[in-house]
Image (spheres, rainbow, N blue to C red):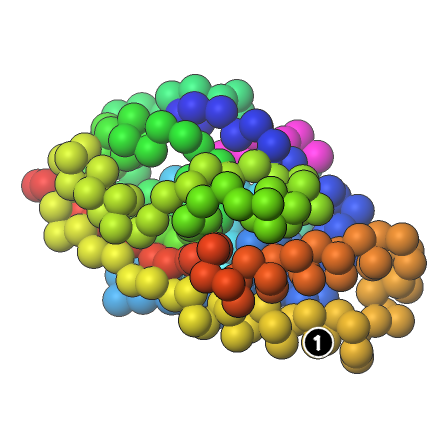
Amino acid sequence: MTDDLEGAGYEVDFMPITDLVWGKGFITPGGEGNVDRIVEGVDLNGKRVLELGSGAGGGTLVLASKYGANVVGLELEAPLVELSRQNARDAGLSDKIEFRCVEPGPLPVESASFDVFYTSGVICHIEDRLSLFRDVLRVLKPGGMLLGYDWFPTRLSDDINSWMKAAGLHLFPDSPENYAKWMREAGFEDVNHFDASDWYQNRAAEELEELTGPLFDKAAEVTSEEVRDSIINEWRAMNLVLQSGELRSGYFRGRKPT
């Protein structure tokens, strides 16, 4: 993958809880509903999709099972790759999905070999977005689509840094508007973006209520009290920066010229 995802590690121990909140295999917000919003209006049936940051395979399984895509998922962390492969086997989708453990750097796939590039909550960890978008353009077939969702810290404030420390993440500040600008500079056309900050600001508050209410005991059962309490502290820190507007989120897409 282009550039470095330093600090983008996810605790596998947390996943039984994120499975409860977002759905099985999801380590980014919104679960299946967010996948639906990312790909809305795009026919993926029989299309070859490259996913950057496939995580534990939650979104990948939706792309394959619900939308009929053939997906190659790229992921840096070997434990996540093994977990996602098991999730695909359990779902009977191994024939439609391939997960690859990769190193940081250029996308390790042939040029003009995919119909769609898909990503959710990943590019925020990569500092050189322009180089990434140029590489995405390279791997897409003419007319291919880039579809994505991401986090957008407005600045590295004390509260943002506290949330990133609690979550074990490192994000680079940016905006949906800059993503669109760099996509155009990379050569994409029909570029557009949509701010979804209000949606996840409201949803994250609901998730915190669930974690401290009806899911409180269940979260400890599927992990431990220590892990549950750590997740709740992370959600509190995230809600703080979402409510202040220091952390935005949104969608973006573009097309490679034919």
**Image quadrant in which you'd find residue 16:** bottom right
Residue reaching furthest left? Answer: 258
In the image, residue 87 lies at what x, y percent?
A: 66, 50
Residue 100 visible? The answer is no
Residue 168 visible, this orientation: yes
Does residue 90 appear left or right of residue 5 in this picture? right
Q: In the depicted view, which residue is nearer to us: 207 or 12?
A: 207
Give the quadrant of the C terminus. top left
Q: Residue at x 76, y 61 (%)?
A: 232
Q: Residue at x 67, y 60 (%)?
A: 235
At 65% from the left and 71% from the top, the residue drawn is 207
Vertical placement of residue 203 versus 107, above or below: below
Residue 57 highlighted magenta (yes or no): no
Residue at 40%, 54% in the rendered image: 149
Callout 1: SS: helix
Residue 67 placed where, x, y %? 40, 62
Question: Along the horizontal axis of the image, is 122 left or right of 78?
Answer: left
Quarter of the rendering occupied by the N terminus: top left
**Quadrant hosting residue 123:** top left
The spot of residue 200 in percent (x, y) is: 49, 67
Where residue 182 sits: x, y (%)?
A: 22, 38
The amino acid pointed to by label 1 is Glu
Q: Which residue is identified by label 1?
A: 209
Q: Is 36 placed left or right of 91 in the picture?
A: left
Foreground of the two, 172 or 97:
172
Residue 22 against residue 13 in the figure, above or below: below
Residue found at the far front of this picture: 158
Q: Mark 1: give few (<14), some (14-19) or many (20+) Cα within 10 Å.
A: some
Residue 228 figure quarter? bottom right
Q: Compare residues 85 and 39 and report the one nearer the observer.
A: 39
- Which residues are drawn in magenta? 72-79
